[in-house]
Image (cartoon, rainbow, N blue to C red):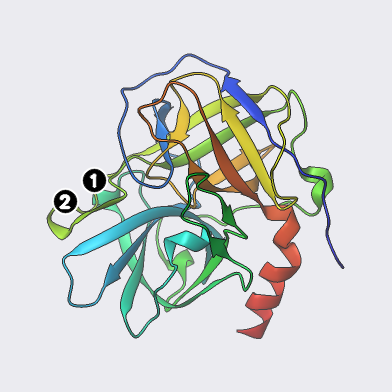
Amino acid sequence: MILTWAPLCLLLARAAPPAAAARKEEGLNVLGGEDVAANQYDYVVGVYNTPKNSRTYSVCSGSIINAHWVLTAGHCVENSSPSTHVVEVEAGAKSLANAQTVRAEKWFTHERYRNLQDPTTRVYYDIALIKLHDSLLQVRNTAIATLPSSGRDDPGRSSTVEIVGFGTEGQGSLATKRKGILKKAEMKVQGTCRNTLPSSYCIKVVDATGRSCPGDSGGPMVYRGRVVGVSSTGNPCTTRRGDAQYTRVSSFLDWINQKIRQE
């Protein structure tokens, strides 16, 4: 089955009052928003990528989609391999300080992944899968995310979606590791914009609070209980207005299923 979708850019506004202060990060981080309740979003995990023999790391978010698999953004694991880097998933808690660590066995970015590193900050096919050594279902307070069954499950104009992720430094030293708190923010689809990939959402943030900004790359966009997007890129947190790109999960269902079957 081949999935193709028309380009869609979601113009989002804050749908509910913000509840917390801002944090700054690299990647995409929920700025403002509110704490996630104890029984919510148990499938959202932290993803640490650390070069071997290094005391620095990068951190993203991800979603458990299988007992041994986590869905995240491609740029979270780009230019790394099991021979040069250690990738770990932090699961089972709403605070990374209390989470349980599960080490990755291998990981895969999409074969057509491209990070242009230009002023547009556009990243193409920004999706990755992480395979873990041990089952995440052995970790308490974890769950498996529900993915869309097809593009018919995607949000449309005037839909309300939630963005979810940990508030933690996108890059840092090992001394400051595991300080994130899981946050969520509710956003409203306002309209469309141009120049986005068929396999991506472009969400335009109108409000300065409760938006995605550096730090929560790889975290989910959730619509009607399904993970429909993966946080990819966004404008710096210091701007009051900006846009953020989310990879459209429904466009990669075949790729996800194929990778898992092959392994």
Can residue 22 be spotted in the picture?
A: yes
Tell me the residue at 43%/18% (across/down): 18
- As measured in the structure, the alpha-carbon distance from the residue carrying label 2 to the one carrying label 1 is 7 Å
Is label 2 in a helix, a strand or a loop? helix
The front one of 96 and 237 is 237
Crowding near the residue tagged with mark 1, few <14, some 14–19, many ≥20 C-alpha atoms within 10 Å: few
The disc labelled 1 sits on which kind of residue? Lys
Q: Quadrant of residue 177?
A: bottom left
The front one of 38 and 4 is 4
The answer to whether residue 184 is above or below residue 41 is: above
Q: Is residue 103 left or right of residue 261?
A: left
Crowding near the residue tagged with mark 2, few <14, some 14–19, many ≥20 C-alpha atoms within 10 Å: few
Tell me the residue at 48%/65% (across/down): 137
Q: Quadrant of residue 21?
A: top left
Can residue 226 be spotted in the picture?
A: no
User: Pointer 1: what residue?
Assistant: 179
Q: Position of residue 58 (x, y in %)?
A: 31, 58
The answer to whether residue 262 is above or below residue 142 is: below
Dot 2 and dot 1 residues touching (CB under 8 Å): yes
The disc labelled 2 sits on which kind of residue? Thr
The answer to whether residue 17 is above or below residue 233 is: above
Q: Position of residue 250 (x, y in %)?
A: 74, 54
Is label 1 in a helix, a strand or a loop? loop
Tell me the residue at 39%/35% (across/down): 236
The N terminus: image quadrant = bottom right
Q: How many marks?
A: 2
Q: Quadrant of residue 51?
A: bottom left
Q: Position of residue 94 (x, y in %)?
A: 36, 44
User: Pointer 2: what residue?
Assistant: 176
